[in-house]
């Protein structure tokens, strides 16, 4: 069964239709990547899944439950994790505190039976296990304000993971990262993807070919090609529309 299912989503801004009858589904242990030229409507689609925007038509289902009308917080509580859209890092708190606060927000009232010291120890344990996963255990005590851009991105992922998501929305996680930082984040996402299914919008084609099981190519709000990374790389419609290269160059050509 699909963990995330998007059925026939459509969205217009005034006279401009930005999502045109888009359907896609992501099963457990799958990474579905969304690629397309600037302005194709990728972020608009992610916003409709996360709840930032309401679609004009169509439905979004998480674990089979219709969440189309749910506000952002209810989607988060239902297990929809997202990163890299709303900056959630608190600069004057340490890395561990940032993750522990996110874990506390997730735990909510279930913590009320514990003495404060025990609750704090539990949150710190949770934070430390997240920091291991994002390979930032050695930065636990550093103020978030003192992190590099790449580390801040990792911390944003850690904050999302502290919410124990059952699905992750990743909107251009590699944007602005250097080569080494992209590879590091790619390693972490590769480990995570078999555990938490994800919808990934990304321009970094190396990351797409490394992480995605399925790729959908969006052009002018419509899915024009879909398949494995290799199938999409060979698809004439994808090459013509997204790569704009007649088959010889462009982003996927570069990754080939
Ligand atoms: N709130 C809005 N009001 C009006 N038009 C919008 C709004 N948000 C996005 N658009 C338009 O919708 C189209 C799709 O934008 P969107 O940001 O979803 O594309 P994208 O594929 O994510 O692009 P990029 O790769 O550059 O991030 C663009 O033409 C954009 O100008």
Image: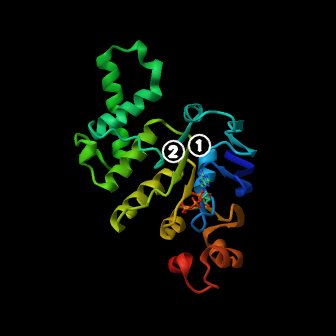
Q: Quadrant of the N terminus?
A: top right
**CB atoms of marks 2 and 1 within 8 Å:** yes
Residue at 43%, 61% (x, y): give it. Answer: 175
Give SS at disc 1. helix
Residue 46 on image: x %, y %: 60, 50
Q: Exactly how many numbered labels are in the figure?
A: 2
- Quadrant of the rendered image containing residue 91: top left
Rendered view: 123 above or below 209: above
- Between 89 and 130, the one nearer to me in the picture: 89
Q: Quadrant of the C terminus?
A: bottom right
- Quadrant of the rendered image containing residue 72: top right
Residue 204 on image: x %, y %: 48, 67
In the displayed structure, does residue 172 sit left or right of residue 219? Answer: left
Residue 7 on image: x %, y %: 75, 48
Q: CB of residue at label 2: within 8 Å of ligand 1? A: no
What residue did someone put label 2 on? 82
Q: Residue furthest front?
A: 14
Residue at 32%, 16% (x, y): give it. Answer: 116
Q: Can residue 32 be seen in this snapshot? A: no
- Between 1 and 226, the one nearer to me in the picture: 226
**Label 2, label 1: how many angstroms apart (C-alpha)?**
7 Å
Few, some or many residues within 10 Å of mark 2 (<14, 14–19, 20+) = many
Give SS at disc 2. strand
Residue 115 on image: x %, y %: 33, 13
Q: Earlier in the sequence, mark 2 or mark 1?
A: 1
Q: Which numbered disc covers residue 50?
A: 1
């Amino acid at each position: 069964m699909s963990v995330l299912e998007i059925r026939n989503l459509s969205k217009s801004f005034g006279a401009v239709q930005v999502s045109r009858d888009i359907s896609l589904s992501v099963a457990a242990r799958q990474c579905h990547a969304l690629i397309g030229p600037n302005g194709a409507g990728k972020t608009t689609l992610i916003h409709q899944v996360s709840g930032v925007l309401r679609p004009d038509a169509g439905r979004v289902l998480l674990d089979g439950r219709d969440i189309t009308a749910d506000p952002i917080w209810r989607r988060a509580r239902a297990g929809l994790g997202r990163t890299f859209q709303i900056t959630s890092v608190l600069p004057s708190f340490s890395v561990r505190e940032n993750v522990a606060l996110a874990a506390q927000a997730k735990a909510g009232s279930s913590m009320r039976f514990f003495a404060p010291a025990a609750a704090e120890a539990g949150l710190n344990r949770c934070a430390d296990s997240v920091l291991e996963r994002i390979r930032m255990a050695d930065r636990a005590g550093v103020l978030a304000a003192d992190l590099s851009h790449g580390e801040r991105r990792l911390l944003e992922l850690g904050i999302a993971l502290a919410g124990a998501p059952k699905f992750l929305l990743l909107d251009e996680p590699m944007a602005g990262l250097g080569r080494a930082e992209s590879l590091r984040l790619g390693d972490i996402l590769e480990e995570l993807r078999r555990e938490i299914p994800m919808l990934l919008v990304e321009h970094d084609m190396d990351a797409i070919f490394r992480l995605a099981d399925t790729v959908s190519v969006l052009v002018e709000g419509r899915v024009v090609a879909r398949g494995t990374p290799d199938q999409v790389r060979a698809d004439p419609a994808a090459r013509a529309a997204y790569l704009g290269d007649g088959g010889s160059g462009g982003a996927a050509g570069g990754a080939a």
